[in-house]
Amino acid sequence: MTDHPGIRHVEIGCRDVAASTEFYRDLLGFRPYERGGPDEQWLSAGPADLLLVPADTDDSGGWRYDDLQRGFRHIGLKVGSVDRQAERVAQAGVPFAVEPKQAYGGVRLCFFQDPDGTVLEFIEGHLDYDKTWTPELAEAERAAHAARPADAPPRFDHVAVTVADATATIDFYRTVFGYPVIGQLLNPKDTRGFEITYLQAGSAVLEVFAFGVDTEPTPWRPGRRARGIDRVAVAGDADTAGRATESGGQVVSGGLLTDRDGIALDVIR
């Protein structure tokens, strides 16, 4: 279990919790542990946990594997070697959404999906930011990469989201949760005005994608748990809800909030 500020766990809707548990345990090495109700499964994944819960519907609730749809994109997992871990994925018969490759920013990565369509990323290396906001955090990332052995197994690193306005989203998470910005990638070759901003969320990272073209609203709706990423649990305090609403978010119920783009955040105190 994790007890740090920032991202605490990611909740994923599953058609078959037992089958998904087997996927994350056997292929990725995440350790199941007992907590909560009998129909759900907690998995220790490093800086944050995963919570697998039964989906209310057999579909993905309108989510598409599409850059320009706002909302949750993927879960990023740091590894010692993308190619070594990708070989295990291939041997298990899991297809790649993106084959292992060198990517903008100086990292190596690949993408694949879990049994319910949740997009997962293996990422190797440290980012060479086009704009560094907090040099000490960027240096800590470089040092962690230098210390990571080639056989290091998958470890939770980040949750990625697409938003309408990067500046507004940065202000939201800095104001509401105090997340500092590590840096940004500004890809000049992408004609859509593509940029990624990286915010330090405790021991994990919130990866924010934004574009210079129009994006579509998130299909996420409260009261419905479709397959895939449903919400992210984050540490907060008694004033988090007030700061969120003042910054353009909404209170859904209890500790559940949405940010400016309708991304669901379960605030844990």
Image: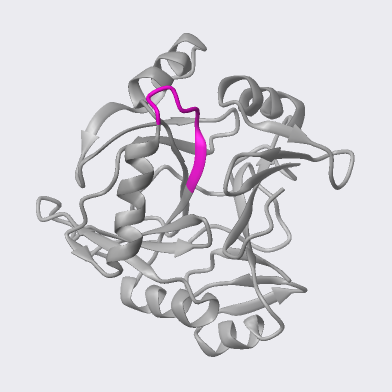
The front one of 157 and 244 is: 157
The reply, left or right, for residue 110 in relation to residue 115 is left
Above or below — where is 115 with respect to 7? Answer: above
* Residue at image point 54% right, 64% down: 263
Residue 49 pos. (x, y %): 65, 46
Q: Nearer the viewer, residue 142 or 73?
A: 142
Q: Is residue 121 above or below residue 211?
A: above
Q: 39 or 48, which lies in front?
A: 48
Q: Is residue 15 visible?
A: yes
Residue appearing at x 50%, y 83% in the figure: 248
* Residue found farthest to the left: 189
Seen at 71% across and 24% down, the residue is: 19
Q: Is residue 211 magenta?
A: no
Q: Residue furthest top?
A: 91
For residue 178, above or below residue 51 = below
> From the viewer's perspective, is 159 left or right of 15?
left
Q: Return the x and y of residue 76 as percentages of the image width and height.
A: 45, 43
The prevailing secondary structure element of the residues shown in magenta is: loop
Magenta span includes 156: yes
Among all residues in the image, which is located at the extreme right?
38
Left or right side of 73 for 7? right
Q: Quadrant of residue 21?
A: top right
Check the picture and name the quadrant holding the C terminus.
bottom right
Q: Is residue 35 above or below residue 32?
A: below
Q: Where, by quadrant of the figure, is residue 232 drawn?
A: bottom right
Counting from the top left corner in percent of width and height, residue 16 is at 73, 29
Q: Which residues are magenta?
A: 149-157
Asked which colour scheme the image uses, the reply is one colour
Residue drawn at the location 36% of the way across and 26% of the way down = 82
Give the image quarter of residue 7: bottom right
